[in-house]
Amino acid sequence: MTTTTTRFQSSVSGVRDDGAFVSTGRLVRAEWTKFRSVRRWILGVLAMAVLTVGMGLFIASGSGTDANTRPEEVTVGPGGARVHDVFQFTHRPLQGDGGITARVTSLKSADGREMAGWAKAGVIIKAGTKPGSTYAAVMVTPGHGVRLQSDFTNDVAGKSRAIPGWLRLVRAGTSVTGYESADGRTWRKVGTVTLPELPQRAEIGLFATSPGVFKVQREFGSTSVGQSTSVVAATFDGVDVQSRQQAASWNNTVVSPSRAGGDEFQGNDFQGTQSAGTFTLRGQGDIAPRPDGDDPVRLPFTGVMIGMIAAIALGVLFITAEYKRGMIRTSFAASPRRGRVLAAKAIVISAVTFATGLVATVILFFASQPVLRSGGFAPPAFPEPSLTEPRIMRAVVGTALFLALVAVFSLGVGTILRRSAGAIAGIITLLVLPTIIASALPISAATWMMRLTPAAGLSIQQTSRHYPQVESVCVPEDGCYYSEPWAGIGVLVAYTAVALGLAYWLLRRRDA
């Protein structure tokens, strides 16, 4: 350590006798000199990168999926997103502009089972009966009121939550406007959407469908998710199609990838009947984006939990080693403003761990994808990810940022405790224990625990798309506890700021 001390003293030899202090820039250079002069710290940074990449590849090689979906049943909607497009469709052709008005008089379970909150029935205009084709629909749902949805990912809430209720859909070119009404006379606009792919000749009519209902069972260390089917029956009256062309007969079609274009109903899950102006539709499925199940991008990044241990040790030792050898007195003699010394250390350790972590996560991303594809995470069920996608870039950069924040947080705790072993053990427990306990708690309790501990920063790794109009199960162990991943990093930033603030306060009041 003599060499390190000499270099540090040399780097701050410009301190004036009148008590003026070295600049933060000079302190940063001095702390960098210290860091690169200690071989075990350099080895620690390299260990962090190697552990992150190595453990990530190990996890990727042990992960697999059967994709649970045959390639021919993967439906792709406008824009290339994977979607569900299964419903009972009673329809007729519409040439050019026009619209449809109908009243939904009832929406209820048709099989005696629990009805999903996102069961839906209403009026729809669609490019055709091919699954995945462009559409716009205004609908009623038992749990979320009136909605205007289009092209699977777009969702606009209406005002009404009552059934029966009147619905109207009007087309003008490629623009489609949805309306709602309680009495069929006074109409309220829900919204307008644009469908660039909507052809001149489209299909317009009524629909009914219902997604399944999720059932979750949790035991310590495991979570099982089941989904029961839900069949709904919807009744319509007051149906009126506004069209310039001669009235056409109604057709009944089950829109589904396994029955594309077919109009032969299989069983009683799908039916469409008409009698004396009343339409009754029975269906199941969904018209919605298909939520990502497994997160193949996140899987290898969970290896950061091992690389994180090296980052914790680095952050703690960067300050406690000086206390152990008495070098901290030299540092404070050179810069009596102790807060600047702490700030310089934080800048150096964060920059080193972020830069090294970023190299490691980029390498891990590219190295793990072939391994994951061989395990079943392959197109079309799992589209090949690209580093240019914002959500992928966020996970890669965010994981490196997580490592940097952990290192700075550890620096603050090390300054507070001044003991290497206790600080390292405490921080590892604080970051790792919540992810273990979470699997034994109910999802709501586990979610809040993960949100309120420093482990929240791991949510930055999630890249699965979640849509508010689609019910899905999101367990905390999968990093899914914040709808906005950056919020988790915000929690870790708050912990880091508190640790540094308390460390600064103690530095000014304790002897070196």
Image (spheres, rainbow, N blue to C red):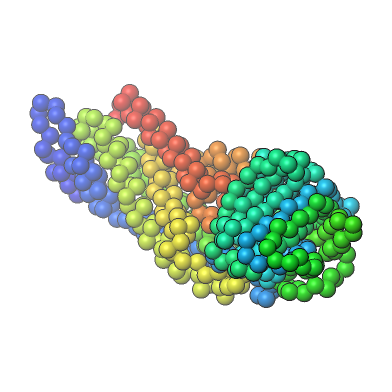
Quadrant of residue 129 within the rendered picture? bottom right
| Number of residue marks | 0
Residue 89 or residue 289, whichever sits in front: 89
The quadrant in which the C terminus is found is: top left
Residue at horizontal 43 percent and vertical 45 percent from the top? 406
Q: Position of residue 1 (x, y in %)?
A: 24, 47
Task: Name which residue lies at 58% across and 73% down.
Answer: 379
Left or right of 112 on screen, residue 325 = left
Q: Nearer the viewer, residue 159 or 92?
A: 92
Res 218 visible:
no
Asked if one can make out residue 386 in the rendered structure from this viewpoint, the answer is yes
Using the image, determine if residue 342 lies above or below residue 384: above
The image shows residue 323 at horizontal and vertical percentages of 32, 37
**Image location (x, y in percent) of residue 156:** 61, 48
Name above or below for residue 302 compared with residue 437: below
Q: Is 377 placed above or below 308 here?
A: below
Left or right of 55: which side holds 30? left
* 89 sits to left or right of 448: right
User: Residue 241 at what x, y percent from top left?
Assistant: 73, 58
Say whether residue 318 is left or right of residue 469: left
| Residue drawn at (72%, 73%) of the image | 260
Q: Work out whether residue 273 or residue 404 is closer to the camera in this orientation and state it.
A: 273
Q: Nearer the viewer, residue 184 or 361?
A: 184
Which quadrant of the view contains residue 15?
top left
Residue occupying image coordinates x 46% and y 61%: 389
